[in-house]
Image: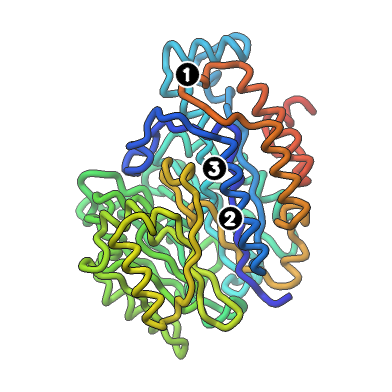
Amino acid sequence: MPTVEANFDGLVGPTHNYAGLSYGNIASQSNTKASSNPKLAAKQGLKKMKALADRGFKQGILAPQQRPDLRILRDLGFGGSDAQVLSRAARKAPELLANVYSASSMWTANAATVSPSADTADGRVHFSVANLNAKFHRSIEHPTTLNILRATFPADQHFAHHAALPAVAQFGDEGAANHNRLCRDYGSRGVEFFVYGREGLNEQAAAPSRYPARHTREACEAIVRRHGLSQDNVVLAQQSPEIIDAGVFHNDVIAVSNRNVLFAHEAAFVDSPAVMAELQEKLGETPLRCVTVHHDQVSVADAVRSYLFNSQLLSLDDDSMLLVVPQECREIASVSAYLDDLLASKGPIRAVEVFDLKQSMQNGGGPACLRLRVVLTEREQQAVNSAVWMNEERFHQLNEWVDRHYRDKLTQADLADPLLLTESLTALDELAGILNLPSIYPFQQSSSG
């Protein structure tokens, strides 16, 4: 097994719903209060994972969070039995109830920032869990995310885990959604490319005026220090404030990389020519191959609607690359025409594969949102919890699990139903056994303690 870039996709949780909690995410807001289908959402994600595993890509699974998290509601003053807490929150603060029910951890690109062992000073894979403090429903994820990552990548000579940065605006951290890595091949030292939306301590610096910039330069710098990265192999760049205001809430909505290829819109960064020049300088003899999409090919608005750049860029056996896109890319004329031209250009991207991820897309997350990239050597792959790798057996096992536990329709009114709480915790308890993740959830820890 050579060094590979594995994808660990978030398994959609049983409370997947459309509450429109993510201001600045146009798809999330536009589908507020629509009916969701948790069963279909989970199966769409599993189908993508299995299809990529069947093609030979290393594919893992990351478990969802415990939802609802009634501890948060109790901390906010709602008392009584579990059923009473749900009922009182539904009457007095339905928006808080929606927050503790969110299945947003399915988008594991936000779970953490990951640096491979080839880049770090101590030769271990480093994980820094994201604090996600820009949004309440996501800010409550990081303690359980840390548990899940530690159970998936056991801390030893191979893996190092860091808790979330301080949950203040200065250190706003959105995880790998604002992180790329460029390299000759996965096993060689790479250039880690951090993208931020604002400078937390510099009020005079450029910033968006309509939507919040969630990720700060200070968070990037802290992770560089934590992971023991050399400044010779790090590039920090600011995301364009104008495209944040156009709905590009994370860098992975406007750019994606794989090895020495950067696929990005021309509007992605502040001073793109200088950013590209620094990337090339630090890559040294490895040529940076930029696949740049121009405004007259695809507008930023169409890029946001289609999630063209929120795609997975994967290496094929012949050294060309596969772009994994949501089906919306074939439903928007300008984007579909661009993809045809891209394939005809005979550049590094030689294949496109389309997946139906509409349940995720309607809540604001495409293929790249659903996965966390982790570069692993042969020994590191063997050290991963073996139960989380996608294969034929796991695919059928998880589909049957979804069939037993998930609803096929969920509305905001259903969040007050005590049966949904019971169904969710029962499902997660069984899942922890399937994926060999002991006591990762608060309800398991309290019941065992």
Bin the neighbour count of mark 2 within 10 Å (Cα to Cα): few under 14, some 14-19, many 20 and up.
some
- Which of the two labelled residues, at mark 2 and mark 1, occupies the earlier sequence position? 2
Label of residue 105 in the image: 3
- The residues tagged by marks 2 and 1 sit, at their Cα atoms, a distance apart of 30 Å
Mark 1 belongs to which amino acid?
A: Ala
What x and y, as percent, mark residue 299? 24, 60
| Image quarter in which the N terminus is found | bottom right
- Which of the two labelled residues, at mark 1 and mark 3, occupies the earlier sequence position? 3
| Image quarter in which the C terminus is found | top right
Q: Which residue is mark 1?
A: 413
Q: Tell me: residue 114, above or below residue 348.
A: above
Residue at 60% across / 61% down in the picture?
7
- Under circle 2, the secondary element is helix
Closer to the camera, 219 or 17? 17
Q: Tell me: residue 208, above or below residue 136.
A: below
The residue mark sitting in front, 1 or 3, is 1
Mark 3 belongs to which amino acid?
A: Ser
- Under circle 3, the secondary element is helix
From the viewer's perspective, tell me whether residue 324 is left or right of residue 383. left
From the viewer's perspective, tell me whether residue 73 is left or right of residue 384. left
Residue at 51% across / 80% down in the picture?
320
What x and y, as percent, mark residue 211? 27, 44
- Under circle 1, the secondary element is helix
What x and y, as percent, mark residue 109? 51, 53
The residue mark sitting in front, 2 or 3, is 2
Q: Which residue is mark 2?
A: 48
- Which of the two labelled residues, at mark 2 and mark 3, occupies the earlier sequence position? 2
Pick out the residue farthest to the bottom.
285
Determine which quarter of the picture holds residue 31: top left
Mark 2 belongs to which amino acid?
A: Lys
